Structures are given as C-alpha cells and as structure tokens.
Image: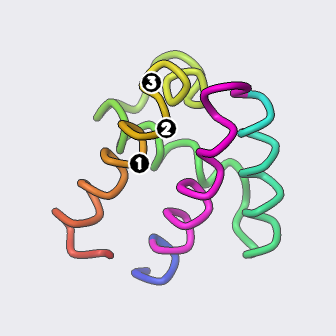
Amino acid sequence: MRNRICGVAFVLINALAAVAAAPAAAQLDAAQMAAAKQIKPGDLQLPLRIMLVGEKSGPPVFDIAALLGSGETENRILNLLNQTGNW
C-alpha cells in the first residue's frame, strides 16, 4: 500500500509543472504518468482531492490545483504524506 501511495504522489507532484497554466494539460500529463506506473488515472483524483481540500467532493480536482498554484498544491500533498508517514 505504501508503494502505491508513493507512486500516486510521485505522479501528482510531477504533473504540477503544467497545472497553473493549463489544468487540462496537467490532467493529461498525470494520466500518462499514471499509465506508465500502472495506476488508473481515476485512482489519482480522490487522493489528490483529499490532499488538497480534505473532502471527497467539489470542483474538478485539477481546477482546484490550478487555483492553489503548484507550490501550495505540492505543499499540501507533501504535508499529508509526512503526517501519515507514507513518504
């Protein structure tokens, strides 16, 4: 499970480079990176949403990341991973 969480986090953090300029491009990048790591793109969305806003529902997750900006998005991902000991 820990490797799966780290794999998801790796994909998410690496997709953040494009998120501020183009959320749709970041979503596509994340999907491609997920496929390379044999992670379903849908498996990225719920963990990312919870890391960013602490809820299971809301606006599109990559739009949330764009509003927060890549720095804050990365901080929130790393914060949760550090708190849970999964990093």
Q: Is residue 80 left or right of residue 49?
A: left
20 or 86: nearer the eye? 20
Query: How far from the left and from the top, in percent, is residue 9?
Result: 49, 63
Whether residue 69 is situated above or below residue 15 in the rendered picture:
above
Asked which secondary structure carries label 2, the reply is: helix
Asked which secondary structure carries label 1, the reply is: helix
Query: How far from the left and from the top, in percent, is residue 84?
Result: 20, 67
The residue beneath circle 1 is 74
Which amino acid type is shown beneath numbered disc 1? Glu
Question: Which of the marked residues, 3 or 2, is nearer the chain's N terminus?
Answer: 3
Q: How far is the residue under mark 1 from the one under mark 3?
A: 20 Å
Whether residue 80 is situated above or below residue 21 in the rendered picture:
below
Q: Which residues are magenta?
A: 6-23
> Given the current orientation, which residue lies at the most extreme left position?
83
Which numbered mark, 1 or 3, is in the foreground of this view? Answer: 1
Q: How far is the residue under mark 3 from the one under mark 2?
A: 20 Å
Query: How far from the left and from the top, in percent, is residue 13?
Result: 53, 56
Instruction: Point out which mark residue 57 bears.
Output: 3
Instruction: Point out which mark residue 70 bears.
Output: 2
| Tag 3 near tag 2, CB within 8 Å | no
The residue at 72%/39% (across/down) is: 26
Question: Is residue 9 part of the magenta span, yes or no?
Answer: yes
Q: Residue 16 lies in what quarter of the image?
A: top right
Asked which secondary structure carries label 3, the reply is: loop
Which amino acid type is shown beneath numbered disc 2? Ser
| Tag 1 near tag 2, CB within 8 Å | yes
The residue at 32%/58% (across/down) is: 78
